[in-house]
Image (tube, rainbow, N blue to C red):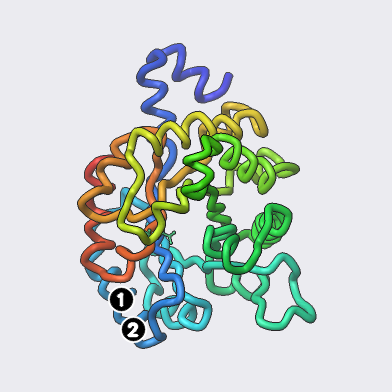
Amino acid sequence: MSFEDHLSISIGDHILHRARWNMRQPLIAGNWKMNKTATEGQVLAQAIRLGLQTSVVEVVLCPPFPVIPIVHATLQGSSIRLGAQNVHWEDAGAFTGEVSPVMLKEWCQYVIIGHSERRQYFREDDEMIRRKVLAALRHGLIPILCVGETLAQREAGETEGVVTAQTRRALEGLTPEQATRVVIAYEPVWAIGTGRAANGADAEKVIQRWVRGTLEELFGPAVAQQMRILYGGSVTPENITEFICRPAIDGALVGGASLRAETFLGIIHETARVKA
Ligand code: PEP
């Protein structure tokens, strides 16, 4: 008999739901995008390290590639994790300008894959993203897979189709064990960097029905329940509660507000307060 079977018999469905939710550690990841020099990155990472007052939330910083080593040194001995913003699918070779998972794994635990800016400006398609997810997993990196619809797709009523297809195409063929190591960030493209965050109830609906629903179809309910799903798009200390008060939402991928220690820490500490 599994741990969950025991739980469902002894404490009933409502509490089981909470137990499942609590099994997923909340995660707040900061995507610095193409911002911060090495010197600036060191100052920011140090301020976040010194200001962090919780162990409830897993915290991940994702600086640009050249800033990763100095942030790595700054975070030595702390619980804060390091992530990259992209990765190539090959281990090595003639791919000028690219960075491989073999190189990243010396420094990072996480890597963002399929961010909408990479899909839009660098023509990354679902097949490239699938290969990157597999490459990351092969080398023990945790992918933070980004999915989300554009404004035009949303207005055309295509959110469900886009989000389920992106999720399915990126993860098809993974074993259930591999799937449990993946984090997904639902990031509606129209909410990224615009100051116009999604409505919490809408984000929850997309995450619960279409992202976790697709994960259930691919890997079964037990695996889908273990996988963390974040919201991303104009998250601030003022609006984070709107998202993380919802059991389906396990944290946030934060862009602009991760560039200042005060705002990033505000988001982390509010998440810890709500999810504790
Ligand atoms: C992002 O870059 O993933 C993001 C969500 O950015 P912002 O928080 O600035 O909207």
**Between residues 102 and 6, which one lies in front from this camera angle?**
102
- Say what amino acid the circle numbered 2 marks: Glu
Are circles 1 and 2 on residues that touch, CB within 8 Å? yes
Residue 58 is situated, as x and y percent measured from the top left of the image, at 38, 54
Residue 253 is situated, as x and y percent measured from the top left of the image, at 41, 55
Mark 2 lies on residue: 40
The residue that appears at 43% across and 52% down in the rendered structure is: 190
**Between residues 16 and 264, which one lies in front from this camera angle?**
264
**Between residues 87 and 49, which one lies in front from this camera angle?**
87
Ligand 1 quadrant assignment: bottom left
Residue 166 is situated, as x and y percent measured from the top left of the image, at 62, 45
- Say what amino acid the circle numbered 1 marks: Leu
Mark 1 lies on residue: 44
Instruction: Specify the label residue 272 is tagged with.
Output: none
Q: Residues within 10 Å of mark 2 (few under 14, many from 20)?
A: some
Question: Is 124 situated left or right of 147 in this image?
Answer: right
Dot 1 lies on which element?
Answer: helix
In whole angstroms, how far apart are the C-alphas of marks 1 and 2? Answer: 6 Å
In the image, residue 86 sits, relative to residue 36, either above or below, namely above
The residue that appears at 52% across and 35% down in the rendered structure is: 157
Question: Is 151 situated left or right of 113 in this image?
Answer: left
Question: Is 252 situated left or right of 271 in this image?
Answer: right
Dot 2 lies on which element?
Answer: helix
The residue that appears at 48% across and 76% down in the rendered structure is: 64
The picture quadrant where one finds residue 50 is: bottom left
